[in-house]
């Protein structure tokens, strides 16, 4: 069996994959990277709905609700917005952050208008990418930003993954961030997906909550194929033993806010 994960630029699932392999070596995970595509996540949702992946990273503006009732969504952490500027730009004088009010009147670059001429974004949006093909538009926009023509707003993880020595990265105060999590089809919900969600949310091995045979907790599901754990709707609630993820919350039942990834 293979579990397929659709990742996006800036995503780093390596720790999840390592934990999964240690606990469930009999189930392989295949990871394909795709460009983030539409800012409302519709491209990623299409990939999952079309069967290109069982689960997908979903990065949405903070507070945005997933209205497509075909999907479950779990929020994992909040990501900061950052501004990328040429090393000679005045933004470089800021140590860590700049305010949106200070940069609002600057010229900004739009990566969606900068895809390489030989690439048809509409045709390639659902093709896995690697290396320089991934986030090609953002790479080109960073190159233009390095020349001092304008500023570029990106999620922190994307900016860090594509960082250049001639471009500085500063967090932006006064702008909403991004809520990053995972999405999957309600019709596809099963013990394997629920177990992966648990790994992604930091559930420890041997917690006594595993439903899969061969897990390090030593438990076996014994459930029929239709007896999977119930999972709530797109508000992020997950079933099974009363766990819940609230909008803006961290791990279930702990009342923590989601982690915010700050620029280093």
Image (cartoon, grey):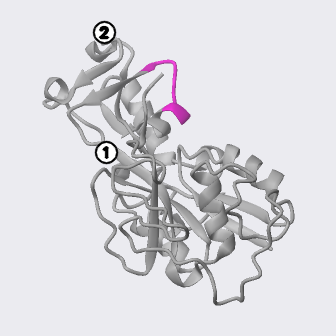
Can you tell which quarter of the image residue 143 is in? top left
User: Which sits in the foreground, 173 or 218?
Assistant: 218
On the image, numbered disc 1 is attached to which residue?
Answer: 110
Choose mark 2 or mark 1, whichever is in front. 2
Query: Which residue corresponds to the image point at 31% horizontal and 9% vertical from the top-left?
Result: 93
Q: Quadrant of the N terminus?
A: bottom right
State whether the magenta stretch is mostly helix, strand or loop. loop
Q: Is residue 33 visible?
A: no
Examine the rendered structure and indicate whether residue 78 appears above or below residue 91.
below
Q: Which label belongs to residue 30?
A: none
Magenta highlight range = 160-167
Q: Is residue 91 visible?
A: yes
Query: Which residue corresponds to the image point at 46% horizontal and 71% vertical from the top-left?
Result: 72
> Looking at the image, is mark 2 or mark 1 earlier in the sequence?
2
Image position, residue 228 (x, y; %): 62, 81
- Mark 2 residue element: helix
Examine the rendered structure and indicate whether residue 249 appears above or below residue 235.
above
Query: Which residue corresponds to the image point at 83% horizontal and 62% vertical from the top-left?
Result: 218
């Amino acid at each position: 069996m293979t579990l397929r994960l659709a990742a996006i630029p800036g995503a780093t699932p390596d720790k999840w994959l390592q934990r999964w392999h240690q606990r469930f070596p009999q189930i392989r995970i295949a990871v394909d990277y795709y460009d983030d595509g539409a800012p409302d996540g519709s491209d990623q949702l299409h990939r999952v709905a079309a069967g290109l992946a069982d689960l997908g990273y979903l990065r949405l503006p903070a507070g945005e609700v997933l209205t497509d009732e075909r999907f479950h969504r779990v929020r994992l952490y909040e990501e900061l917005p950052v501004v990328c500027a040429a090393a000679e730009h005045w933004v470089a004088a800021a140590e860590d952050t700049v305010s949106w009010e200070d940069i609002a009147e600057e010229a900004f670059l739009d990566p969606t208008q900068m895809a390489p001429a030989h690439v048809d974004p509409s045709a390639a949006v659902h093709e896995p990418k690697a290396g320089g093909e991934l986030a090609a538009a953002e790479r080109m926009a960073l190159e233009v930003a390095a020349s001092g023509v304008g500023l570029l707003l990106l999620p922190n993880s994307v900016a860090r993954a594509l960082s250049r020595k001639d471009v500085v990265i500063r967090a932006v105060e006064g702008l909403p961030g991004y809520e990053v999590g995972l999405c999957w089809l309600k019709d596809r919900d099963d013990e394997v997906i629920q177990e992966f969600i648990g790994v992604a949310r930091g559930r420890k091995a041997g917690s006594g909550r595993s439903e899969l045979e061969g897990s390090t907790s030593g438990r076996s599901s014994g459930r029929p194929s239709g007896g999977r754990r119930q999972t709530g709707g797109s508000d992020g609630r997950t079933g099974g033993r009363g766990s819940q993820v609230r909008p803006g919350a961290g791990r279930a039942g702990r009342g923590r806010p989601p982690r915010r990834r700050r620029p280093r």
